[in-house]
Image: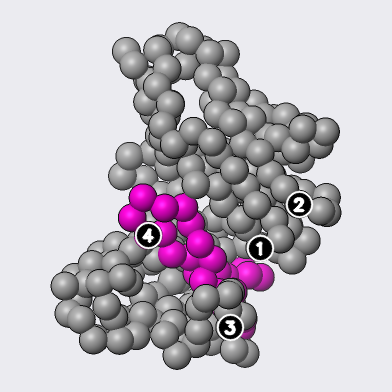
Amino acid sequence: AQRVTQPEKLLSVFKGAPVELKCNYSYSGSPELFWYVQYSRQRLQLLLRHISRESIKGFTADLNKGETSFHLKKPFAQEEDSAMYYCALLAGNEKLTFGTGTRLTIIP
Amino acid sequence: SAVISQKPSRDICQRGTSLTIQCQVDSQVTMMFWYRQQPGQSLTLIATANQGSEATYESGFVIDKFPISRPNLTFSTLTVSNMSPEDSSIYLCSVQQGNQPQHFGDGTRLSIL
């Protein structure tokens, strides 16, 4: 069975500092990975997916199959980045498995 | 992406009662899902709502407790039956069209007294 691990429940970073939110997965097949974000009082929304290989709001994430990781990175944190971030894996059966989430707080 | 309307947005219910949550999408979608997010926890898939047939439930979830309907490609309901305080959670509807990522509704925050 697939599993997604986000080791940090809470992460605080100063504004302007680099951000890295960790995500590791276990899955025997070829995974599709996502980062979802939930800002205060808003719905859960897609931030990015690995197959798009794009940067959204300055965030990037690279799938590292050797390390089974999909860490989310941003070089310079902004206050509006404060939110709950969930890493998710889509298995071949079309079911999304979510990590436990990391609450990111940007310190002004 | 599809616009998802979920209601009610929140409710406070008495123990032993049932509540039906509705999920309406503004366009036809292939897949609809129901998730639960218990306080301080991640999202857990309850079931996949299948159009015109019985939902596919995940381990630990049963039809008697969480009956689901999906009469067409734009609408689904989830009922939480015979509620107890342990059912206090946020319940979320999500939709997927083709190979696009899942998109989520605003959720229903349910509290059981």
- Marks 1 and 3: in contact by CB < 8 Å? no
Quadrant position of residue B107? bottom left
Vertical position of residue B31 compared to residue B99: above or below: below
For marks 1 and 2, give the CA distance.
Answer: 12 Å
Provide the secondary structure element on which disc 2 rests: loop
Residue B25: x and y, percent? 49, 67
Residue type indicated by callout 3? Ala
For marks 3 and 1, give the CA distance.
Answer: 14 Å
The disc, 3 or 4, on the residue closer to the chain's N-terminal end is 4
In the rendering, which numbered label is found on residue A27?
Answer: 2
Residue A64 located left or right of residue A19: right
Q: Nearer the viewer, mark 1 or mark 2?
A: 2
Residue linked to disc 3: B55
Provide the secondary structure element on which disc 4 rests: loop
Chain letter of the residue beneath label 2 in the structure image = A
Q: Nearer the viewer, mark 3 or mark 2?
A: 2
